[in-house]
Each structure stands twice: as structure tokens, then as C-alpha cells.
Amino acid sequence: MIIEYLRYTIDEKHQSNFISDYTQAAEPLMDSSYCRAYELTQCAEDASQFIIRIEWTSADDHLKKFRTSPEFKKFLAFIKPYIKDIDEMRHYEQLDVRT
């Protein structure tokens, strides 16, 4: 498993649309056999900051298989307006350091 984190800065006038669009984008995302879990969070101290966390079966499955799938096309239709607002997009391996 690999975890993708996307960090966004979204100005106040676009925040409700951003949340709505990412809520709708969850359906095609979760329809993918490569996506294991998905969550959207908003910073409590700075409402313009959002983090999306997606668990993928692997980085390869995400980058090569999901991105060429019909589910990706549906997902992208919802989130495309916000690509320019991505501050960071990276994949992380989960470590066995937790409680």
C-alpha cells in the first residue's frame, strides 16, 4: 500500500465548491479497484488549507493503471479546476511506527 497526500490552498470564495466537487469525486475514486481509502481534511487554524489522503494499492497502480482508467476520467472531471491550487502531491510508504 502507498499513501498519496495532496496539499491545497483554496481561497475562501472557492472553498464550498472545492468541498462539493471533491465529495462528488469520491464516487469514481472509490469505484477504482486501486483505491483503498480516501479522506478530505480542512485546517482548523487556516481554512484555506486542505489535505487529501488517498490510500492506493501501490504507486504503480495509481500512476499507471488508475490514471488510464475510466474512473480517472470521471474523477478528473470534478477536480480539474483545482489542479493549479495543488501545493504538494507526494506518495508515502506507511511505517510500522504508530499506536
Image (cartoon, rainbow, N blue to C red):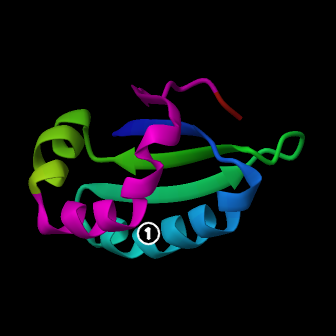
Image side of residue 93 versus residue 6, left or right: left
- Crowd tier of the residue under label 1, counting other residues whose Cα lies within 10 Å: few below 14, some 14–19, many 20 or above: some
Left or right: 41 as drawn, with respect to 96: right
Q: Which residues are magenta?
A: 69-97
The three-letter amino acid code for the residue at tag 1 is Ala
Q: Nearer the viewer, residue 25 or 78?
A: 78
In this view, 98 is above or below 56: above
Q: Quadrant of residue 49?
A: top right
Quarter where residue 35 is shown: bottom left
Give coordinates of residue 43: x percent, y percent.
78, 44
Query: In the image, is residue 82 above or below residue 17?
Result: above
Residue drawn at (43%, 55%), measured in percent from left and top?
81
Residue furthest right in the image: 45
Quarter of the image containing the N terminus?
top left
Q: Is residue 79 left or right of residue 15?
A: left
Q: Residue 4, position in %: x, y?
A: 42, 38
Q: Which residue is mark 1?
A: 26
Residue 16 drawn above or below residue 84? below
Q: Position of residue 2 (x, y in %)?
A: 36, 36
83 in the magenta segment: yes
Q: Residue furthest front?
A: 13
What residue lies at 45% left-to-right and 39% top-to-bottom? 84
Instruction: State the residue at coordinates (74%, 45%).
Output: 48
Question: In the rendered structure, does residue 82 fall within the stretch colored magenta?
Answer: yes
Q: Nearer the viewer, residue 28 or 48?
A: 48
> At which x and y percent is residue 71?
21, 67
Q: Quadrant of the C terminus?
A: top right
Question: For the image shown, how many numbered marks are present on the structure?
Answer: 1
Q: Quadrant of residue 25?
A: bottom left
At numbered mark 1, what does the secondary structure look like: helix, strand or loop? helix
Residue 83 or residue 88, whichever sits in front = 83
